[in-house]
Amino acid sequence: MFAFPTAHSSRFHQDSSRRRELREGPKDRSMTIQSISSLSPSELARQLRDQGLNLGIGPFVTRIQSTIPSVVRGIRLLYAGYPIEKDSTFADFHVHLAPPRGLRRWFRPQVLFFFDGHVPFKPLPLAQAYPFFEWGLNWCVAQYANQYLILHAAVIEKGGHAVIMPGPPGSGKSTLCAGLVAGGWRLLSDELALISPQDGRLTPMPRPVSLKNESIRKFAPGVTIGPESADTTKGTVAHMKVPDESMARVDEHATAAWVVYARYDAGAPARLERRSKAQTLLHIVRNAFNCSLLGERGFQTAADLIDTCDCYDFTYSDLDQAVGVFDTLLDEGLLPIS
Amino acid sequence: MSHDQGNRSGADHAATPEDHSPETESSAKGRRQFIKKAIVTAPVILTVASRPVWARNCTLSGILSGNLSDEGPPCEACTPGFWMKAAWPKYSRTEEFNSVFGTSHWFFTQDNCTTLDEVIHIHKKPPTHDGQLENFGFQAVGALLNAAAASMGMLNFGYTEGQIIAMVHDALSTGNYTAVQGDLADINTMGHCPFPHWVEF
Amino acid sequence: MLSPKPPRWKVPSGFSLHWQSWDDEFVVYNSGSGDTHLLDVVAAEALQSLERESANLLELARKVAASLEIKLDDKLSAYLERLVPDFHRLGLVERIK
């Protein structure tokens, strides 16, 4: 029987706070923590097949199990630098990707996403297993990480200033995010902004950046792109590996300075315009995953965030030009109102 | 970038409109003109209604994500056709459409089409030149009644009255009722109607 | 024959309204309903007035006109005549006896 989200989330909220307290203070990851890349391919495959692998992703530990080759390959390539949590008893999320039993294991094969033993989604074609993993993990965090105000937004940072870019898939924010990251901005997240109600700061949860269709080809050889999956509802999807510099700073929280609504518009010159803070606050309240759930606290967190940020609409077509505008915003602090 | 420090303390001291920092003569005048402009038209209040957590899946975005399993309590909704005949929860048939939704759309102030009952029976009247608007009104009243039944705990419907009222109000204010009409029709057919036609609320 | 007393309105005392404003746009969160609203400066002044104390439409018009330093004219009255029922529908104010 599917348990209602509220029951889940309150249990989860207590558990993950406790887990974070139990972890040691300053993170000295270099000395004691093993990363995915330290496992041989066969050892990695074995652990994913058997007891599962406890992967540290930002503030969360995710136990992942799968025997599906594309998932194993994707994790080996795109999560190479991520730490493996030694303590195997705690995980914030248990995720398992597996073929269904019966006919669909072999005939027009499918893959199921299990979360904490439940099946929240219908199966997808096996060829889409890796994007299903990424998308499903986003869903898990968005549903259950209610110790944060969660926005559907990309978050990047440079020079101590973070930019939150709200927008659903298809709005162009992921491509812009990938371009900025390739251009030296630190990645906190390409899908989910995690805002602490206590201090309004952003918690990084860097994960591979999803790219679609033409965008996949755009990036310089300097970035690692994972395997492509065709025929998803979004077209062809691939993921860009998080740069080492972003990974190294995964425990470093950030303060938001700008909220930018980015929209790709073919042929349009890059244009940045201020937008109404009140309208932005309303949009955030409407589109956050859990503003309602958090009640007054959710509203106040969103209001404080908008109060301290400059809010803009941004249209672009040329990615290099767009990155240039962001760097100018950083250098000049404030864009002159034209 | 101006912001009100007074707001940080929450409900204790709300920044009031006249609390703003001392203004020059010309900015005070500009402000008065702004205020005068505000009252020339009918008030517009944009609303984001809170979402009932338990009905999270029974919404357009939940269904359109196309990937929700069949687990959990089934979504429920009754069509406007059902509500034409059934007893109504909370609302009286003689309430004015424009009063309930806070709108003043010309169509619904025309003769013999101003109450909720008249609007839900719009198809029985001589056709107007705006079929989309007729359908919009028809679906709007149906959705409102679904939300009212949900608020009484009698229907697993994914929207509150506040949300439906806001959606209808915004659609008519902006003139975007054609698109929203389709949404409301989808919302009203999002599930099985559990009531017999003779239900009492 | 007595004419009926005009209705009086007030924000229910159990509710707390949380305000955030920039320039002349006001956002208010109603903890009673969980809803969030965007109001212009006149609507915000009217709602804050009804938060402090109850009023009928005429009293409210006088207070709003005085606070915002504008004329109490037909436009303002007409505006408030639509605004207050909107507030009522949205669960922001109640009628009191």
Image: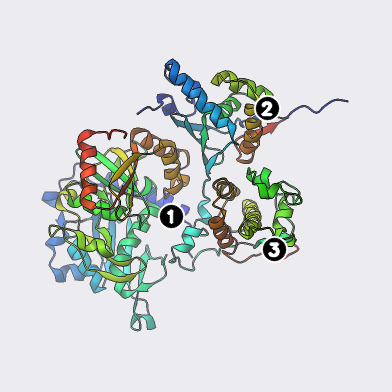
**Image height of A229 relative to A182, above or below:** below
User: Can you see residue B158?
Assistant: no
- The colour scheme applied to this rendered structure is rainbow
Tell if the residue under mark 3 belongs to the same chain as the one under mark 1: no
- Using residue B6 as the reference point, say whether residue C84 is left or right of it: right
Q: Which residue is mark 3?
A: B82
Amino acid type assigned to the residue bearing label 1 in the image = His
User: Which amino acid lies under the numbered mark 3 shown in the image of this protein?
Assistant: Phe
Q: Which mark is residue A8?
A: 1
Depth check: give the residue in front, A43 or A196: A196
Mark 3 falls within which chain? B
Query: How far is disc 1 from disc 2 in space, using C-alphas?
Result: 47 Å
SS state under label 1? helix
**Where does the image place residue A233, in percent across and percent down from the top left?**
37, 68
Foreground mark, 1 or 2, reads 2
Q: Given the image, on which type of amino acid does mark 2 rest? A: Leu
Name the residue nearer the viewer: A220 or B65. A220
SS at mark 2 in the image: helix
Judge from the rendering whether residue A97 lies leftward or rightward of residue B164; answer left or right: left
